[in-house]
Structures are given as C-alpha cells and as structure tokens.
Amino acid sequence: MRKDDIFKEFLQHPLLQEKYKIDSAELPERVSDGLSSDHPIVRTIAMILEGKENKDDSDNIIRTKVINYLQTANTNL
Amino acid sequence: MRIEEITIENYMCYFGRKSVNLASGLNLILGDNGNGKTKFYEAIAFLLNDLPPSQLSGVVSKKALYETAPEDPIRVGVKVKATQFEETKVVERYFTVQRGQDGSINASDTNLTATVTHAQGRSPANGKLVLDQLFPPNLRKYLMFEGEGALNIFNNTDALTILIDNFSQGKHYRKYTDLGRLLKKKAEKAVDDASRTNKKNELKLSKAKADIELLTSLINPKEEELHALRNNLTQTEEHKAQAEAYVANADALEIVNKRIEDVETKLTTRRSQLKEKYTSYLFDDKWILANFAPFQVKFMEKVEEIEQQKREADRTHQREVGKQQEREKITLQGNRNPLPINVPSVRYVKEMINEHFCKMCNRIVEPDSEAFRFMVQRLEEYEEDIRRTREEANKNKLFTDNYLRRLITLTDTKNDQGNVFAEVKQSIESLFNFNQGRKTDISKLEERLEFEKGERNEIVGRSQIGAERLTTVLSQYTRWTNNINADKSRISVLGESIAKLKSERAERHKEKDRLDNDNVDHFLINAQNLLRDVEEIFTSTEERLYREFVEDLERKTNEILQRINVDSFTGTVVFDLTWFRGDPKIKIRLVTGDDEAFSSNQSLETTMHMAILFAIAMLAKDTKSESFPMIFDAPTSSFGEPKTKEFLNIVSESDQQRIVLFYNFLTKDENGKSVVKSDFANVKRNKAYVLQLKRPFDPQQLRTIDTLIEEI
C-alpha cells in the first residue's frame, strides 16, 4: 500500500529520534499500526495519512480529529 | 499502459483497414520519406486530439474516395487497443464521409467510442474517459514527439517540473505537505488568538508580532527579487552557453578578419609599389637604348672607316683638280696677267658704265666707243666668270654635302653617352628585381589571403550562423558575461541580507513563542509545536524524495546519455532543483567536466532530451508509477545509422513500450522498392514493420496511393 510506504518515509525523519527520542525499532511499519502508537507525533502523522486516504474526510474533519486526539494526549505532548 | 494494436482505416495514405500489433518494449516502424511514417503518427494524433470539422475531408484516403461509389459511406478512423490495470480497453475515433454525384465530399462529425473488457466481461464505456485514462491529457505532450525539435520540451522549466511531478513520488506527498501546512497555520492562529486575549505581556507581544511582520515585509520582496534574479541568471547562463558554441568562432572570426584586413592592406601597398609602365620607360627613360652600346661601337667604327675613305677620296680628287687648274692657269697667262677677277668689282664696273667715265684711267668714255664696249664686255665676262667659277668650284668638289661631319658629331655625342646606356641597363635590372620582389610578396600575400578566407569560411560554416550574426554574438556574449557577474554579485548580497533578516525574525519568533508560552494554555502551545514538527517532517520528506528522485534522474540520464553517445563527448546533464515557497523548480544544464555550461549540437541535444525522457520513464517504473508508451516520429534525423543503432539498442533494453518511426536502414532494390539493409539485423527490437507504398502507383495521383504495413 502506498500510504504505508509514505508513512515509513515520514517516520525516517531525524526529528523523531533527535527531538522525540523514539527508537527506530519502535516505529510502526503500517499506518494502521501508527494509529495506535503511544507517540503523539507518530499517531498524528498516521491519522493525517489515514484521513487523507478516506475520501469522505475533508481537511477540517481531519484537523478536528487530530486536535481532539491531541487534547486527549496533552499530557504526553 | 501498453498499446496492443493500432488500426488505421482510410486515413490519408492508409487505404482500407491497416493494423499493427505492438509488443512491449521497442517497436520500430521503418519507412522511406513519403511512405506514410508521419501519416501514421498523425493518425494517432487524430485519435488523441481530434480535428476541426473543416479538416476532416482532407484526411480521407483519396484512393477510398476514388474507388467507392458516389453516395456510399466511407468509414475513416483510428483505433487503439490497449491493456491497462488488467483491463483491455479499445478506443476509436472515427467519422464517415460520402462523395456526392457532383464530386462534393460530406463528412459527418467525429465519434469517440470505447469498450472495456475486464474480468466481468466486455462493456461499452465513455470514449473520452477511456482515452484520458490511456493517454492522460497532462502527459500527452511527453508521450508523443514529432521530429527532433519536439523533444526540446525541457527548455521550459515548468515542463520538466510537471513531468517529474507526474512520475516521481513527490506528487503523492504533496497533499500531506499541504495539509501539514494548514494544520500548523491553524494551530499557530489558535495560539495567536489565545495570546491576544490575554493582557499579560501585551506590549511585548505586540512588539514581537510587529517586528515579525516588519521583518517578513522586508524579506518577501528580497526573496522575490532573489528568485527573479536566479531565473534571470539561469537564462543568461543558458544564452551564454548557447553563444559559447559560437563565441569561440566569433572570437576566431574577429581575429581572422583582422588578419585578412592586414593582408589586404599589405597587398594594396605592394600592388601600388609595382612599376610596370614599360612602354613609357622604353622611350621616356631611354630603355630602348639598353642594348645600343655594341651598335654604337659598330657605328663609330663604320663612321671612322667611311671618314678615312672620304678623306682619301678627297685627297686624290684634290690632286686631280690641282693638276687641271695648273693647266688652266698656263693657258690664261697667254699675254698678260689679267687683273683679279673681282678688280674692279662688278659694282664699280657697272658704276663706271653708267657714268660713261673710267675711274681707273680718269677719262670720259663715250658710248659706242671702243673703251665703252670694252667696259661692257669686261662686265659681261666678269659676271660669266663669277657664275662659271661657282660652277667650277662645285664641280671640283668630290662630295657636295658633308654628311659625314654630322655622323662624326653623333658618334662623339653617343660616345659621351656610353655611361647612360650602362645606367639604363642597371635601372632596368634594378626595377625588374624590385618588381619581382613585390610580385613574390604579392603572391605570398595572395596565398595567405586565400588561406585566411578559407579559415573564415570554415569558422562561419562551423558556427551554422552567418558572419554578421557571429559578430553580434561576440558583443552579446560580453554583455551576458557582465550581466552574469553582476547577477551573481547581487544574489550573494541579497542572500546574505535575507539570511540576516531571517535570523532576526527567528529571534523574534522565539521571543513571541516564549511570550505565548507564558500567556497561552499549554495544550495549544504543545499542539502548535507538534504540528509544526509534523509540517516540517512532511515538507522536508517531500523535498528529500524530490531531491533523491532528481539525483537518480540525473545519474540515470547521464548513464543513458553516455551510452547513446558512446565514444563521443557528451558533457554532463545537471539538474538544478530549487524550492520557492513550497514549489519545486527544476532546470537542466549541460556542463563540461569543469562545470562550465556549453551549448550542444542537435544530435547531442536530441539524445540528452531522450535520455531524460527514458530516465524518467525508468524511474517511474521503479517508483511503481504507471508507465505509458512513448511515440516518436523521426527522432533521430541528425543521427547516422551507427548511432541510431546504438541508440535503439539501448532503448530496447527497457521493456517499456516505445514506438519509433524512422527512415534509417532502408535501401532501394532495382524496382525502387524499399529493402531493409542487412545491418538492421543487429538492431535489437521487439517488433519491426516497414511501411511501403503498394505498387504500381502513379506518383502524380494520390488516388493510387496505398501504404502497406509489412512486419519484418
């Protein structure tokens, strides 16, 4: 699936290790796995990819979903 | 997508239905000029782009029109059968035409129909939709190329960017990058809004925001200017590179022109120095006397000899005369010695006769007297004597005229001129030597002039532009060089200025973030920071993938280019990728090993563009993008057969479908029929056809023309 490839490309970014201290072994391979990640940055990226794949989701819906998630995860941010 | 079959029906020189089955990989269609190659290409273009109604009757096979009964419909169309995503799609554009009894031709509107065969069976489909699926409109101009000139699509920066956008993975990331930007913007706005409502640090926050706005307003126009300058610089460098091909020639031309001018000036001087008015010199400068000296000696000897003879004759004669006179004198002295012949003189005798008086004896002389008669007789005798004496004197001379004296004078004079004769000879010799020297110079200069003119012709010929334009190129080249230096200098200044302003703005941003952090709920700040990072990840990933694609493209393009142009100088194709406000811009440059831009010849230009196209297609396949067939009409006109063979062999290595129409590898048999050369056996391909006019035909009558398609 292209979205999983894209997801993996995003997760290669050095910020994840340098700033968020996420070990590369912890990085999920698929978007579906990313949606249940404990790392908000990983999960946010997965939510954006998933949202974009779903043609019913507009950008505003995706944003709302992301913000709602971030509120719940605020303490981990 | 792969084209399985193309069918052409009653289109131009294709009478009836003519089909070609195409394979994956390389499909070659050979045809001599005038045998239907371009019409084949145009038939496909008709399927893709349609034609205005007014042009339809013009593309109908004349043979079909002539051989079909009036009022009978003739079907004209082009059909493509292709496989795409495990479906077989057939799309056809066609129209019907009828020839009236009066010879008029009426064409219907064109129809575009399609069918799609999939696992569930075959079903009709929307013709335009299927056509656009098979040949996406935004890619068509990158799939079909008529002639070498059409390959020059990459002179337009956008063309290459769009093409890479379509085939690289970049386009798949764009939507995330856009959404990432939006999320970040909204998060920042939420922080801004929340911060504004909080009066704490209001003044500092306002100042930080005002500073950021001010700095942004300073940065933006500078960035615009920098972007424009970079574009301008690239263009000027391209112009300079194009001119470079000529500038060496222009430089050489200027030098050779100066040399020609110099030689011509010397020639004019040498020619003006020549003294060749020989007719004048013959008389005015006494050249005629050049060889007179021996004649002069002979002449002198002769005169001396004659003079001696004359003197001898004179002496002998005088001796004879002397004897005679002696004899006469004795006779005269008979009685008395007469008075001298002139005593008294004739005048006095006449005076005395007139006065009747003798002044000798002082007495009158009566007329008719004895004395008077004596006086008269004496006068008559005297007069007779004078006359006779004169006659005698002449009679006694052996030579009445003394011409010899004149001859002696002449010999004396000419003898004095002996040196002059020598000088004449010297001056003739000297002038001839001088003229010969000038003529040798002139001959050498003329040879030099011929050589220089040959050089000039060669330079002008080599440059493919006229001598006048070459001279213009040199002045433009100098101007462009100056502009490039000025642009580079300005770019450097602008870059430093922008970097400084951005650094200041970053500091203001940090200040604002710090104030926001104090003012705003931590969730908003955390969300903003996280979404900023998401946006950074999306953007830099897209840029990285673009960059990697372009680097791969550059590498692959150069590999292909060097393989096509094996053993030739190719230079290196450089892809410059820049980002301006989130959009990639890609430009290509052909450079030497020293990174100096240079202008390629047509053949290299063609191979460079093809190398890019093929490299893109190969990379697109690597990135699992769909590939499309490419169709080329006579793309290798500037290649010779060996290079065409190398080129095709490289193309054949890919299993991506390409259809190439060209005229190489054909010769004629004794009947004028096209025959494929044996060397074509060495050309790797998946399928090959030859287009051939059906014989017999009348070259003056289109209604006899029918192109046959024969598989090789």
Image (cartoon, helix red, strand yellow):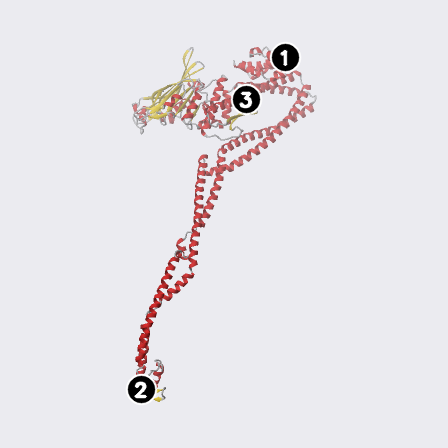
B32 vs B70, nearest the viewer: B32
Q: Quadrant of residue B132?
A: top left
Q: Which chain carries label 3?
A: B
Name the residue that disc number 1 marks: A73
Q: Residue at x 54, y 21 (%)?
A: B546
Question: Which dot, 2 or 1, sits closer to the camera?
Answer: 2
Measure the alpha-carbon separation of dots 1 and 3.
35 Å
Name the residue that disc number 2 marks: B372
Q: Which chain carries label 2?
A: B
Packing grade of label 1 (10 A; few <14, some 14-19, many >=20) is some
Q: Quadrant of residue B41?
A: top left
Label 2 residue SS: helix
The disc labelled 2 sits on which kind of residue? Phe
**In the image: residue B219, left or right of residue B9:** right
Q: Do we see residue A56 in this rendering?
A: no
Seen in the picture, residue B74 relative to B265 is either above or below; the reply is above
Q: Which residue is drawn at 49% across and 31% down?
A: B599
The disc labelled 1 sits on which kind of residue? Ala
Measure the alpha-carbon separation of dots 2 and 1.
193 Å
Q: Where is residue B611 in the image (x, y as percent from the top left)?
A: 47, 24
Q: In which quarter of the image is residue B675?
A: top left
Location of the C terminus of chain A (image quadrant): top right
> Disc 2 vs disc 1: Cβ atoms closer than 8 Å?
no
The disc labelled 3 sits on which kind of residue? Arg
Q: Where is residue B405 in the image (x, y as percent from the top left)?
A: 37, 66
Question: Which dot, 1 or 3, sits closer to the camera?
Answer: 3
Seen in the picture, residue B358 relative to B453 is either above or below; the reply is below
B308 vs B482, nearest the viewer: B308
Packing grade of label 2 (10 A; few <14, some 14-19, many >=20) is some
Q: Do labels 1 and 3 share a chain?
A: no
Kindly identify which numbered label has been placed on residue B547: 3
Q: Position of residue B381 (x, y in %)?
A: 31, 81
